[in-house]
Image (spheres, rainbow, N blue to C red):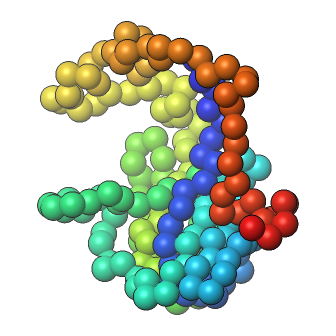
Amino acid sequence: MITYNGVNHVAMITGNMDSTIRYWRDLLGMRLVAGVGRPGYRHYFLEISERDLIAFFEWEGAEPAVEKDHGAPLSGKVIFDHISFGVENLDDLWELKSILETAGFWVSEVVDHGFIYSIYSFDPNNIPVEFSYTLPDKDIRKNPVMADKQPCPTALEGAEPQPGKWPEALKKIPGIDRRIYPGAGSELFHGTK
């Protein structure tokens, strides 16, 4: 079984890297840890935690998204609703609310979801952002809960991965066939492409 260790990065899009860095680094306090680019293109990474990053592509002509409330249903082609960042304690949540409001960003009231307390806002790209504090005695990662009155059939199978639902990999890739090719970002440590 594969062992995951967090979200390496979530990649978003911006048309203005400067305002994006100002928000994520200078307002929210995330470190800018890497950046690559060339005319018409940038890809920058900010550190959320010791294991997790958020990244932004900047492309010419990219515009902020149409504002969409967190969790509000849409029809048609969709791919993303919002991103939620965990905070260590309840004071952090209140501090973030104050920081965002002082900077002129709309911020929701603190919302009690039963297992987390959250605030909602938008970054300069209109990306819906949530900040959540997990209630210590209600951590759904430790104690999964299914409260849907009509859960889909697959959810009824439980929290753990169900073996045998997909075909097993037919072969292991031998060491001699394992090749790694340079991609965007390799210039950070291997020189210019």
Q: Is residue 111 left or right of residue 37?
A: left
Q: Residue at x 38, y 27 (%)?
A: 145
State the image quarter where residue 177 is shown. Answer: top right
Q: Is residue 190 left or right of residue 181?
A: right
Q: Name the one closer to the observer, 10 or 26.
A: 10
Q: Residue at x 66, y 63 (%)?
A: 184
Q: In x, y percent, where is residue 163? A: 41, 11
Q: Residue at x 76, y 49 (%)?
A: 50
Q: Name the one closer to the observer, 61 or 186.
A: 186
Where 18 falls versus 132 (above or below)?
Answer: below
Q: Is residue 119 left or right of residue 87?
A: left
Q: On the rendered image, what quadrant is the C terminus found in?
A: bottom right
How many tags in the picture?
A: 0
Q: Is residue 104 left or right of residue 31?
A: left
Q: In x, y percent, where is residue 53? A: 66, 57
Q: Residue at x 52, y 31 (%)?
A: 141
